[in-house]
């Protein structure tokens, strides 16, 4: 079976403590084909999931918003409809940000910043809302990124994480193992020409925290936390208010 011309780059080992450089190289390589892969692989479900995540920001979406691990700026673009005062879109793969730049009108209050989620170049107490879509499971030392979220959020600010957590129920395990191990690498490979990236992305779900364990990490940083699974029960939202 032939598909898109092949892409090649170093691919990280899911869960490896030192994987950040390979994660960045992989996303920089995937960048021009990332959106297409997303739409095909999520069967269009990613857009309703993103809408639910943005709704969980409540009124804070009208303040200063950080789109963390912003990638090709789908959330940044959609957040503009909420009338935010500003959006800072942070990602450490410059080519992902570059691939999304054309989605953002020139006069929108958006700043693109190439930086690591574990060392945010933002002032303490400088944002009202943080949203992170499918980013944190790629970040080694995820606790450091959460420390940074707590540092830059104003008291009363909201953190919303949309993510694929390690499945815990039999149904989510069944859905995820079939989908992740077989369909994602095969279809992702055909559509983008970078099968290894989708094998990594699938493996990174099993190597990530469960939702309850992740909620505990967030709560330990001074957030009141709630979490819920979306439909179908593969993606989840964890949201918290900084006390
Ligand atoms: C699966 S993509 C998600 C992009 C986007 N948020 C979305 O919803 O489509 C994950 C993104 O996280 C970024 N990322 C991974 N580790 C990071 C880190 N340590 N610091 C900043 N960005 C990171 C990657 O470069 C990539 O663009």
Image: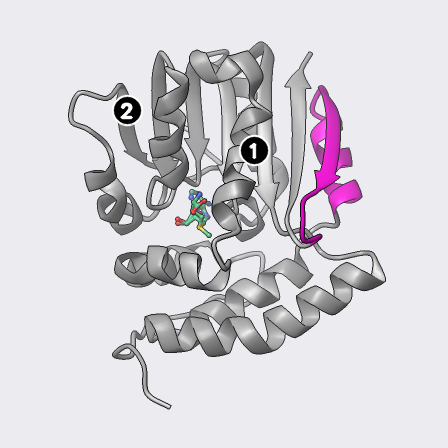
> In the image, what residue occupies the spot 50% across and 75% down?
185
Looking at the rendering, the stretch of residues picked out in magenta corresponds to 211-233
Would residue 163 be seen by someone viewing this image from the given angle?
A: yes
Q: Position of residue 119 (x, y in %)?
A: 45, 33
> In the image, what residue occupies the spot 46% across and 74% down?
187
Residue furthest to the left: 106
The quarter of the picture where residue 196 lies is: bottom left
Q: Is residue 211 left or right of residue 150?
A: right
99 in the magenta segment: no
For label 2, count other residues whose C-alpha is less than 10 Å away and answer few (under 14), some (14-19) or many (20+).
Answer: many
Q: In the structure shown, which secondary structural element does the residue marked by tag 1 occupy?
A: helix
The quarter of the picture where residue 224 lies is: top right
Residue identifier under label 2: 110
> Which of these two is toward me, 177 or 137?
177
Q: Which comes sooner in the sequence, label 2 or label 1?
A: 1
Residue identifier under label 1: 53
223 in the magenta segment: yes
- Does the Cβ of the disc 2 residue fall within 8 Å of ligand 1? no
Q: Is residue 137 left or right of residue 10?
A: right
Q: In the structure shown, which secondary structural element does the residue marked by tag 2 occupy?
A: strand
Report the number of discs.
Answer: 2
């Amino acid at each position: 079976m032939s598909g898109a011309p092949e892409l090649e780059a170093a691919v990280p080992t899911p869960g490896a403590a030192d994987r950040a450089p390979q994660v960045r190289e992989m996303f920089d390589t995937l960048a021009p084909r990332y959106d297409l892969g997303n739409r095909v692989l999520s069967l269009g479900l990613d857009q309703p999931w993103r809408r639910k995540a943005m709704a969980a920001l409540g009124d804070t979406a009208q303040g200063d918003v950080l789109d963390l691990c912003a990638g090709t700026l789908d959330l940044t673009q959609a957040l503009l409809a909420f009338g935010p005062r500003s959006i800072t879109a942070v990602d450490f793969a410059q080519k992902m940000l570059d691939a999304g730049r054309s989605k953002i009108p020139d006069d929108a209050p958006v700043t693109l910043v190439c930086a690591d989620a574990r060392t945010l170049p933002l002032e303490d107490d400088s944002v009202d809302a943080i949203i992170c879509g499918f980013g944190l499971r790629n970040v080694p030392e995820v606790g450091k990124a959460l420390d940074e979220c707590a540092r830059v959020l104003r008291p009363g600010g909201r953190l919303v994480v949309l993510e694929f957590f390690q499945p815990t129920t039999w149904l989510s395990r069944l859905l995820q193992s079939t989908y992740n191990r077989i369909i994602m690498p095969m279809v992702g490979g055909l559509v983008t020409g970078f099968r290894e990236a989708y094998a990594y992305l699938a493996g990174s779900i099993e190597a990530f925290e469960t939702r309850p364990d992740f909620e505990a990490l967030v709560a330990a940083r001074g957030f009141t936390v709630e979490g819920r699974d979306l439909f179908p029960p593969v993606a989840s939202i964890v949201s918290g208010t900084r006390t």
